[in-house]
Amino acid sequence: MKTAITEMFNIEHPIIQGGMHYVGFAELAGAVSNAGGLGIITGLTQRTPELLAKEIARCHDLTDKPFGVNLTFLPAFSAPPYPEYIAAIREGGIKIVETAGRSPEQYMPALKAAGIKVIHKCTSVRHSLKAEQIGCDAVSVDGFECGGHPGEDDMPNMILLPRAAEELKIPFVASGGMADARSLVAVLAMGAAGMNMGTRFIATREAPVHDNVKRALVAASELDTRLVMRAIRNTERVLKNAGVDRLLEIEHEKGAKLKIEDIRDEVAGVYPKVMIDGDMDAGAWSCGMVVGLIHDIPTVKELIDRIMAAAEQLIRDRLVGLLGAETKASLKVA
Ligand SMILES: Cc1cc2nc3c(=O)[nH]c(=O)nc-3n(C[C@H](O)[C@H](O)[C@H](O)COP(=O)(O)O)c2cc1C
């Protein structure tokens, strides 16, 4: 399948694996790129720019195909040295960067000077337009369904994607709630040039996380995510667990007076405990509503191949099948 995104990133299938803290290591990014999608290493999971350089080199050993690096500009307890991370990306020969969180405006000159294509992930039409205006090459439009940070507008993709299509000139992919061929075909119809998946890629054989995490995703339903940190305007969609219950209790008690220090134990340092140790009650970790559509743990290649095969079948059999005989004849399809 050819779209503006497959052309821009020189990939076979219009499927991107979004950056994920403590999940987006070389093993997963390499597997996604080898399967014809775009794999993305999560920059800040590497504690220093030197470690990111090593992770990029490791991924080059695993695949000859293009892969990217995610750089997230979120409120953190201490700001990372972004220019040094960008130097590691540039020196590692990376040509695609997924930015997220705050606007990447400040870093665009450095990224563009290195010939890097920038896809910015954002949760609203106004932020997408801003990304276009500052020179981003594409946008990942992240609906309210998404795992991670859905922003504060609560706009689901059924509205957000057609609105993005109305306003944007640069290509965009749909992010949030994407799981399978139905997702891909639906978002192509709404004007997207592909899809970005996060949660779905965690439940794959290659995702380098504890088996407890993959089992929890298969066991959970679409009703099992919660929104946390709304009071401090850093809303995150996470999988419900005992740590999240504690966090919600604190949030309930503190109300609008909530401060990040009040919930530090439930949100800071949680990822290694969950992803490496498999401690599923450690606290808040991102997970999308799409978890309700995850029923197995295939290899990345099985997942991507089955999405592409079923998408073609959906278009051919279901969509074209709905057309009248005359239109079908004019399209020269059976
Ligand atoms: C466990 C997890 C960790 C994530 N970490 C990051 C991150 O560090 N930076 C980022 O830009 N997005 C992060 N995301 C968001 C994903 O890149 C992607 O936008 C999102 O998962 C899409 O929604 P979905 O989960 O419904 O597919 C994370 C998502 C998950 C599930």
Image (cartoon, grey):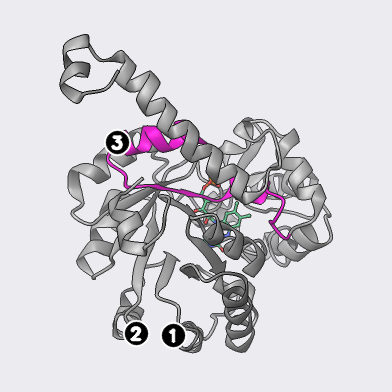
Q: Residue type at mark 3: give it.
A: Met
For residue 190, the mark is: 3
Position of residue 308 in the picture relative to residue 287 (left or right) = left
For the residues labelled 2 and 1, the Cα–Cα distance comes to 6 Å
Find out whether residue 158 is within the magenta segment. Answer: no
Vertical relation: 165 (above or below) 318? below
Instruction: Say which element carries label 3.
Output: loop
- Residue at which label 2 appears: 114
The reply to whether dot 2 and dot 3 touch (C-beta < 8 Å) is no
For residue 163, the mark is: none
Instruction: Say which element carries label 1.
Output: helix
Residue 12, x across and y down, in percent: 42, 54
For the residues labelled 3 and 1, the Cα–Cα distance comes to 34 Å
Vertical relation: 148 (above or below) 182? below
The answer to whether residue 221 is seen in the rendering is: yes
Residue at image location 52% in from the left, 71% down from the top: 64
The reply to whether dot 2 and dot 1 touch (C-beta < 8 Å) is yes
Q: Is ligand 1 less than 8 Å from the beta carbon at label 3?
A: no
Who comes first in sequence, dot 2 or dot 3? 2
Q: Report crowding for label 2: few under 14, some 14 to 19, many 20 or more residues within 10 A (C-alpha).
A: some
